[in-house]
Image (cartoon, grey):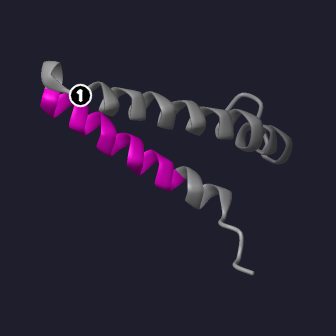
Amino acid sequence: MGERPDAVDVLETDHRAVEMLLTQLERQAEAAPRRVLDDAVRALSIHSAIEVELLYPVVADRLDGGVDL
């Protein structure tokens, strides 16, 4: 069995993927295919859910002032 990916690595990969999609949207502006917009919305939704459900609770619990972060 393979090793589970580190959550921070997954989030960093997601950040890069979303940045690429947003750059693609900026370049294509009005001509951007609906698929690119849908992909960006999907990626941001998944990324946000991971942060809210998995990352933020750990930060709040383990870091001084984590709740405020």
Q: Residue at x 14, y 33 (%)?
A: 27
Q: Residue at x 66, y 38 (%)?
A: 51
Is 4 rendered above or below residue 11?
Answer: below
Q: As rendered, which of 34 and 27 lies closer to the eye?
A: 34
Mark 1 element type: loop
Residue 60: quarter of image = top right
Q: Residue at x 73, y 37 (%)?
A: 56
Residue 19 forms part of the magenta stretch:
yes
Q: As rendered, which of 58 and 44 lies closer to the eye?
A: 44
* The magenta segment: 12-28
Name the outermost residue toward the bottom.
Answer: 1
Q: Residue 49 at x, y = what percent?
A: 66, 33
Is 61 rendered above or below residue 34?
Answer: below
Is 6 rendered above or below residue 48?
Answer: below
Q: Residue 24 at x, y = what percent?
A: 22, 38
Q: As rendered, which of 23 and 57 lies closer to the eye?
A: 23
Where is mark 1, residue-wise?
A: 33
Residue 45: quarter of image = top right
